[in-house]
Image (cartoon, helix red, strand yellow):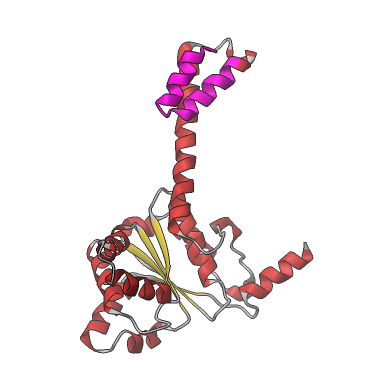
Amino acid sequence: MNQQNYDKLKSLKLMGMAEAYENMSQGQQFDELSFDERLSLMVDHEESLRKTNKLTRLISAAHFPMKAAIEDILYQEDRRLDKALILQLATGNYLTDGRNIIFKGPSGNGKTFFATAFGVQACRQFNKVEYKRLPHLVEEFKLAKYQADGSYLRLMKKLVKTDLLILDEWLLYPLENEEATIINARHEAQKSNIYCSQLNISGWYENLGNGTVAEAIMERIIHNAYDIELDGKMSMREKLSFKQTER
């Protein structure tokens, strides 16, 4: 291995190519490859490493509350899940179309797990995702208002521009002006949101403040949204507990 070439690749931050170059110098199986074939392997390794690093950054920046993935979803009969719909949504077409997903159901039935799984899937497709619990977001805005460093505007801009916004514990408390502004701005920008709520949609109206503003927000959320009810005789927490016991 030419150490100077290796050091230059690292200084140019071509870490994948440097790693592949080092591996090739140590393996005789690469000796018979042409220059183009070796270069192709180095470029492929660089691309793969960059994608892996980007995915790691996206998942870390999303602040997910747990580990979850589409492939880990349990399709027990009592849950009455539409597997075809879940797999269709996993392709990410709803993001392209600017459509929302609503996960409804009692506490413990897997709303946060599903939202996180879809958020991770969106990250795998290299979308920027932000996970927020609505009560925490309300407090975040209250603190940002009193900062003189532009925190409030940066938070608003970040939430409006992100490719997918996940709002957990949706309408557990009445909606504040900031959250309503974000919903309206993301609707105008045709950005997708995922809502997790213990309330049926019919019970949203009161916590949206009633009146024409509430009607407008509901229309923007519900219009073309995928409404998914998470059911089951046993909660997800209980099922996962039993599953771990069996292991």
Residue at the spot x=65%, y=78% of the render?
A: 234
**Which region shows up in magenta?**
1-25
State the image coordinates of residue 100 (x, y, percent, origin top left).
Answer: 36, 67
**Residue closer to the observer: 172 or 230:** 172
Residue at the spot x=34%, y=89% of the render?
A: 206
Count the marks: 0
**Magenta portion: prevailing SS class:** helix
Is the residue 192 above or below the residue 31 in the image?
Answer: below
Residue at the spot x=53%, y=24% of the render?
A: 20
Quarter occupied by residue 175 = bottom left
State the image coordinates of residue 162 (x, y, percent, origin top left).
Answer: 33, 58
Quarter occupied by residue 242 = bottom right
With 220 as the anchor, is 114 left or right in this view?
A: right
Is residue 20 one of those drawn in magenta? yes
| Residue, far front | 148
State the image coordinates of residue 227 (x, y, percent, origin top left).
Answer: 42, 73
With 56 as the anchor, is 244 left or right in this view?
A: right
Is residue 89 one of those drawn in magenta? no
State the image coordinates of residue 51 (x, y, percent, origin top left).
Answer: 45, 40
